[in-house]
Image (tube, rainbow, N blue to C red):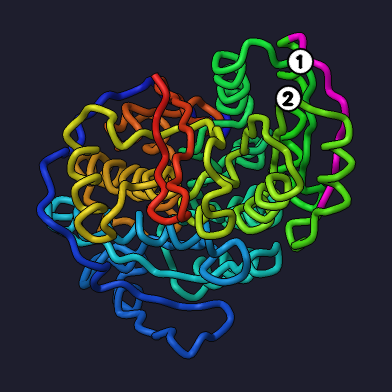
């Protein structure tokens, strides 16, 4: 989203009413890119006489996240967030009386899956915009497809450098790693001001992890700490004995890990089993409660910077938090909150656009273009707090946090405890 489509910011209020207890997603189309036997095909939302799909049915919003592969530990939380958003906003009247309808495509965990999902959503499902993909690595491959087709894209968890710069139709509700990541290192220093030596681990096959580790390494330097070793791994790895042993032999006071939940959790577990007792900082890919079953009691004490807190004040967050805890019996994680916020941006922008000119009167290409413009000029009161966008689609967000994982000795029922 470039300056050519930037306009003076127009503030408008979002509806933020309290939500009653919420069950699983309803009226949701699930179209798996891998033809899962659990998939259903029901494109009534788009098979209408109007090319927008809004004159005789719901407004279709594409959801392209990882429902399978090792990345599904993150994608599952995003699915939960968008389903809660669909139910909540439809209970409030949708887009001025017209409901929204989520259309799912599974991106799996690689670039090919994301590309296929985007192409299907754009060309077959005729969605007005897309929430996704899960990984920055996927965004660099799939987002250009949406941008060339002039379909708005909102990244719910793409925090690598230069994501909004991919194209005019690309924005994100996930704050960049350069803003979020340093907070966890500073929190570690606050907990232990005597920290001196740092070991850094990162997944070399993941764009986000490579982007994040550069920020972490610069933060280590900026804080006057010594980087004693840099250890690489793959997101598909399960054995980290060699890297962990090499690092432990250098006696680091702090370990920083950039990876995903499965590999990161196994790395944490093996570091602890090999005797490492110092602080551990995890990157955004480890920012999920799905990490806890991987490293169990050995997850205890891990620090992770956050762009969301369940305790954030505000009516919309209270509604989201209640709906999530009623449904899943635990506090909502960041990935769910960001996915909810991404759907909310579409709904709020559509409501504002509809008040100017009824969206069901637009042809699909025109609706996508006008919606893209409207997204940029809005201010959105989301579970993340108040957010907006720069002219290129970068999220503007004020509030950030650091959480520390607390686990009982039996490794069950762990939680993220937010530091003051």
Where are the magenta residues, as a range? Answer: 224-233
| Residue 70 sits above or below residue 141 on the image | below
Secondary structure of the residue carrying tag 2 is loop
**Residue at 43% across / 86% down in the picture?**
38
Residue of label 2? 253
Q: Can residue 140 be seen in the rendering of this structure?
A: no
- Asked if marks 2 and 1 touch (Cβ < 8 Å), the reply is yes
Image coords of residue 224 (percent x, y): 76, 9
Front residue of 214 and 341: 214
> Is residue 226 one of those drawn in magenta?
yes
Does 357 appear above or below 236? above
User: Relative to the observer, which residue lies in front, 407 or 176?
Assistant: 407
Q: Which callout, 2 or 1, points at the residue further toward the start of the chain? A: 1
Q: Measured from the top left, where is residue 20 in percent x and y? A: 10, 53
Image quadrant containing the N terminus: top right
Q: Which residue is drawn at 62% across and 65% down?
A: 70
Q: Label 2 to label 1, Cα distance in Å?
A: 6 Å
Would you say 11 lies left or right of 303 here? Answer: left
Magenta stretch secondary structure, dominant: strand
Please provide percent x and percent y for residue 134.
Answer: 56, 54
Left or right of residue 275, residue 179 in this image: left
Please give the label number shown on residue 196.
1
């Amino acid at each position: 989203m470039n300056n050519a489509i930037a306009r003076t910011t127009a503030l408008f209020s979002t509806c933020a009413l309290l939500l009653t207890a919420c069950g699983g997603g309803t009226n949701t189309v699930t179209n798996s890119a891998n033809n899962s036997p659990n998939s259903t095909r029901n494109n009534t939302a788009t098979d209408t006489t109007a090319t927008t799909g809004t004159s005789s049915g719901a407004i279709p919003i594409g959801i392209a996240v990882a429902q399978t592969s090792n990345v599904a530990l993150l994608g599952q939380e995003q699915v939960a967030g968008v389903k809660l958003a669909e139910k909540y906003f439809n209970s409030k009247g949708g887009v001025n009386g017209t409901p929204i309808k989520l259309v799912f495509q599974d991106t799996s965990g690689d670039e090919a899956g994301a590309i296929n999902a985007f192409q299907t959503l754009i060309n077959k499902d005729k969605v007005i915009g897309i929430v996704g993909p899960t990984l920055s690595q996927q965004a660099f491959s799939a987002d250009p497809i949406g941008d060339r087709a002039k379909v708005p894209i909102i990244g719910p968890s793409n925090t690598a450098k230069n994501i909004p710069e991919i194209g005019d139709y690309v924005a994100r509700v996930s704050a960049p790693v350069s803003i979020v990541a340093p907070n966890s290192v500073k929190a570690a220093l606050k907990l232990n001001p005597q920290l001196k030596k740092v070991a850094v681990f990162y997944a070399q096959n993941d764009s986000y992890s490579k982007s994040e580790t550069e920020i972490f390494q610069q933060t280590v330097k900026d804080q006057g700490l010594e980087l004693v070793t840099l250890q690489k791994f793959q997101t598909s790895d399960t054995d980290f004995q060699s890297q962990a042993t090499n690092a432990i032999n250098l006696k680091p006071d702090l370990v920083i890990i950039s990876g995903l939940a499965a590999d990161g959790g196994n790395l944490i577990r093996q570091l602890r089993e090999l005797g490492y007792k110092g602080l551990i900082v995890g990157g955004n890919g480890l920012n999920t409660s799905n990490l806890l079953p991987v490293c169990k009691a050995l997850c205890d004490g891990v620090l992770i910077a956050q762009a969301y807190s369940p305790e954030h004040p505000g009516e919309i967050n209270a509604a989201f938090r209640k709906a999530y805890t009623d449904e899943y019996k635990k506090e909502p994680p960041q990935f769910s909150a960001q996915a909810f916020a991404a759907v909310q941006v579409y709904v709020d922008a559509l409501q504002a656009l509809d008040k100017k000119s009824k969206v069901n009167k637009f042809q699909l290409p025109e609706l996508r273009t006008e919606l893209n413009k409207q997204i940029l000029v809005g201010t959105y009161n989301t579970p993340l707090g108040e957010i907006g966008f720069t002219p290129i689609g970068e999220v503007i967000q004020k509030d950030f946090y650091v959480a520390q994982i607390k686990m009982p000795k039996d490794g069950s029922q762990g939680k993220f405890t937010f530091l003051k």
